[in-house]
Amino acid sequence: MDRMNSYVTADTIRRRREEIGYTQKQLADQIMVSDKAVSKWETGRGLPDISLIEPLAQALRVSVAELLCGQLMENRNRAANMRRSCFYVCPVCGNIIHAVGKGSFSCCGILLPVLEAEPAAPGHEIQVEVIETDYFVSLPHPMERSHYISFFAYVTQDTVVLRKLYPEQDAQTRFPIAGPGVILWYCNRHGLFQTRV
Ligand SMILES: [Fe+2]
């Protein structure tokens, strides 16, 4: 991201309003303010009250996160293939978000960056064994509260299987084999890794 704002800007409101083809009056009516108020926001002579941010985002058909950071995502994900899956992890609460393409997702008030999966690093190499009709995936890795494998995922053309792990469990899981794809695993300290299967 080239530019991050902490609050909605004049430019974001005007650009988005014009994109969806509203007049200032039409936007104003949607969120029950005067067109003069909208004009002020768009010329940097005022800012919408915080209570208007959610209705404003709705009227402009963007998420609150997009509105606030000024980085508007277009809907480019309609034909997305699961293999282009994106994972996001909240650094505060550990929430995991899977998306079929990039987007703006926030948790605990933080706009989450998409995780970039790397090839296995030392100490994070997985073993994949075929046992009957399953992949048995394991790695020798700490499973302590402060350092553990938080999930495994198996991504194929049209399916994602996400397996959540918790500290004190073993760092292993089984996935029914569903064709060629990618296995990913996430360490809360060292990040996201992947390997083809
Ligand atoms: Fe680790």
Image (cartoon, grey):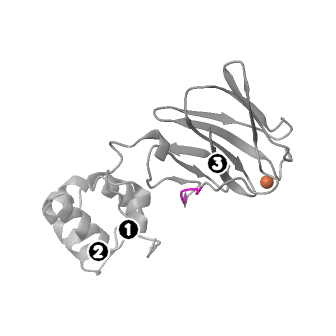
Q: Earlier in the sequence, mark 1 or mark 2?
A: 2
Q: CA distance from mark 3 to mark 2?
A: 39 Å
Q: Earlier in the sequence, mark 3 or mark 2?
A: 2
Tell me the magenta residue range: 111-116
Residue contact between numbered discs 3 and 2, judged by CB atoms under 8 Å? no
Look at mark 3 in the image and give the residue it sits on. Answer: 194
Single out the residue that lies furthest toward the top: 132
Residue toward you, 36 or 171? 171
Residue located 29% across and 80% down the image: 44
Under mark 1, the amino acid is Gly
- In this picture, residue 187 sits left or right of residue 87: right
Q: CA distance from mark 1 to mark 2?
A: 8 Å
Q: Secondary structure at mark 2?
A: helix
> Neighbour class for label 2 at 10 Å: few (<14), some, many (≥20)?
some
Under mark 3, the amino acid is Gln
- In this picture, residue 35 sits left or right of residue 185: left
Residue contact between numbered discs 1 and 2, judged by CB atoms under 8 Å? yes
**Circle on res. 177:** none
Examine the rendered structure and indicate whether residue 196 appears above or below residue 61: above
**Circle on res. 11:** 2
Q: Quadrant of residue 174?
A: top right
Q: CA distance from mark 3 to mark 1?
A: 31 Å
Residue toward you, 39 or 175? 175
- The picture places residue 186, in percent across and down from the top left corner, at 69, 48
> Neighbour class for label 3 at 10 Å: few (<14), some, many (≥20)?
many
Q: Give the quarter the ligand 1 occupies.
A: bottom right
